[in-house]
Image (cartoon, rainbow, N blue to C red):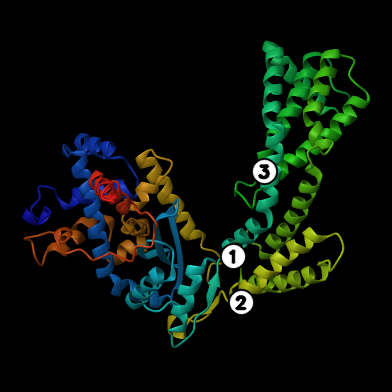
Amino acid sequence: MAQLLLPRSRVGYDVLVYVGCQRFLQYRQRLEIRADLERQYGIVLSTGEISALGQRFLLYLERLHWKGAPTLRAALEADGGWPLHIDATGEDGRGTMVTVLAGWRGWVLSAWKAPTERAEFILPGIQRVAAAFGAPCALMRDLGRAMTEAAQQYVQSLETPIPVLACHQHFLSDIGEDLLEKGHNQLRDLFRKIKLLPHLRAFVRQQGRHLGEAIGPGRDALDRWLQATDHAHPIPQGVGGITTVRSLAQWVLDYRADGSGQGFPFDLPWLNLYGRCLHLSAALQTFLHTPPADGKVRRSLETLRRILHPVECDRPPFTSVGDSLAKRADLFTRLRAVLRLEDNEPTVKQLKNVQSALKRFTASLRRERPRRGPARDIRQAIDLILAHLDRHSPHLGGHAIAVPREAGGGVRLVARTNNDLESLFHTIKHGERRRSGRKILTQDFEVLPPAAALASNLRHPDYVSLVCGSLDHLAEAFAQLDAPDRSRSIAAGPRHNNTTTESASLSTRDKQLVRRPIFEDRILAASQCM
């Protein structure tokens, strides 16, 4: 019986595993876990005990992970090696967590906290992972200076060089932000200056109030108008006309529907709004060329046109900002088409085609670049893209990795992005928001143990099979960690010293120190001595 319980505890290893999985895989709140334990198993624990068990679960999981490193390494070697994917996440620049993932398996091999994202805090983690799991066959990183320097230093230390690959998604994001952010923000500010969206929303609400219960027949009339084969068909009369004008304004308000849901810079909502405003302005001119006989409908059309008039008449200067942004967006769209990130599982031939297309695109930009004249903006845009290509193109290819003959031979492809890691980070943050009820996770990420990333491995049956056989045997595997000394839990043993150079200007721990009343009293007392 004693072997079923944690040393010096009344809680069993099975309860430890249950709490840990509920906390770090399902991201359930303490009260939910407490209620389920009491309802399903008759076990009563306080919320404080549940928090403590969650932390102990990660300590056991991390110890089990490193204990199983030789077995995991053998599996990776049998695959013909493993590509190292590395990325970092945090919240508001705090709680930075660096994570290394084995690409072909999808396992998190290590995660650690860094006070700031600098090479000196990243390189030792890479070296530790490589020492435990074998040198990777390739290294995929983002484009940040810290990751770039750490990757370069690590590869230079190897006897046999490996490809260092830049994440294509980060590459596109960096170019898109540099290329489009200024113009997109300018267009946003212009729309806010004329208060276009508030005016449109107020107009739609007013039309809705005028329609009242007649909105149903009005929508039927709108549907009949849309079904008409003559596209120049005049606006309907009566409630059908008011409903039609209201829907025209709503079409502009629905500008975000033109996006793909990927966010900036892949979606440009303010440019989409600008385009819809221009299209509707032109359409209103057509509708008013032969104005409706119904005075209410005509006045509604004229009111809507007045709302859009500042965009149409270029006051403030929408045209120069919108046209410049559209041209830059076209360049970005061409680059995205060249990289073809929508191909989730490309072949070796397709990757070669991407590299060839990238060279042709680079050459075409050099030909298209205006050398003189008024085309200054497009020249700067092309120069910006070419600068990125010159700096990063050596790391945009080399994804085909030859597999050793003893591992089956052939070629395997490294993913072109760090999307698996980004997805993991999204899952963790989404789960932490669900658990804490907070949108801003600055404090949560500062106290979240990096071993929380290892919990995602429990979703991989191949990983679980190697470290403990099955999830049903995870509690038994934890108990085996304590078997050599049942007098104390490994969670009560000496902790690794995770203290690192503190380079953050005001970390949470430092903030706690300087906010102590006695600290301020000491300063005030010293200031009065002069």
In the displayed orientation, state which residue is furthest to the right. 290
Which mark is first along the chain, 3 or 2?
Answer: 3
Say whether residue 332 is left or right of residue 49.
Answer: right
Can you identify the residue that label 2 sits on?
394
Q: In the displayed structure, does residue 237 sit left or right of residue 82? A: right
Q: CA distance from mark 1 to mark 2?
A: 12 Å
Residue at x-position 68% and y-position 42%: 188
Q: How many marks?
A: 3
The location of residue 169, given as percent across then percent down, is 58, 61
- Check disc 2 and give the amino acid type: Pro
| Foreground residue among 474 and 27 | 27
Which kind of residue does numbered mark 3 sit on? Pro
Quarter of the image holding residue 63?
bottom left
Residue 482: x, y in percent? 13, 62
Q: Position of residue 509 (x, y in %)?
A: 30, 53
One can see residue 229 in this view: no
Vertical placement of 228 versus 89: above or below? above
Which residue is tagged 3? 269
- Whether the residues at callouts 3 and 1 have beta carbons within 8 Å, the answer is no
Answer with mark 3 or mark 1, whichever residue precedes in sequence: 1
Q: Local crowd at mark 1 within 10 Å, few (<14), some, or many (≥20)? A: many
Which mark is first along the chain, 2 or 1? 1
Q: Which residue is mark 1?
A: 168
Q: Disc 1, disc 2: CB below 8 Å?
A: no
